Amino acid sequence: MTGFVPLLWFAAVVAVIPLALWLLRRSGVAGAARAAAGAPRTVAVLALSPSQRLVTVEVGQGEERLWLVLGVTAHSVRTLHTMGAQSALAPAGLPDAAGAPAATFAQLLGRLRRQSGGDAR
């Protein structure tokens, strides 16, 4: 019976490790440490199809922060646009901090296509 108790304690410790890792992940402590180190942060994701997404990622720290708009497919990742980091995403149609209405996604995409010389249907 005395050889059974250490085995029981060992099993309990092994069972607690995944629980502790899950709690750490849910608490956000691990994410805060990663963000403090300047790791990229996902700002927004828009699913275009089951295998295509538009992803906005923030990279850098402080004044050197940038937002990258990425086109992500099953086979590649392409940088579609680079811009300075914004303080917050304003919902389409609502005024931003300066009082001007925020552009919709369709308007922004049309402007980007015109700037790059693409077909702006």
Image (spheres, rainbow, N blue to C red):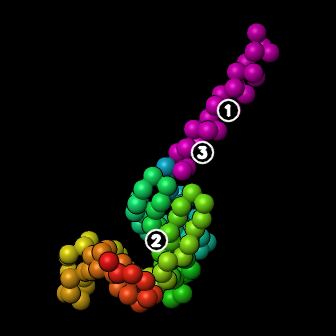
Amino acid type of disc 1?
Val
The answer to whether any part of residue 36 appears in the image is: no
**Contact, CB < 8 Å: mark 3 with mark 2?**
no
Left or right: residue 3 compared with residue 52: right
Magenta-colored stretch includes residue 20: yes
The residue drawn where x is 49% and y is 83% is 82
Q: Which mark is residue 25?
A: none
Q: Main secondary structure of the magenta part?
A: helix
- Where 75 falls versus 41 (above or below)? above
Residue named by callout 1: 13
Residue named by callout 3: 21
The answer to whether any part of residue 82 appears in the image is: yes
Secondary structure under tag 2 reads strand
The residue drawn where x is 52% and y is 64% is 72
Give the x, y percent position of residue 32: 53, 64
Q: Which residues are magenta?
A: 1-25
Give the x, y percent position of residue 96: 25, 82
Residue named by callout 2: 56
Magenta-colored stretch includes residue 99: no
Q: How far apart, in angstroms, are the residues tagged by discs 2 and 1? A: 40 Å
Give the x, y percent position of residue 15: 64, 31
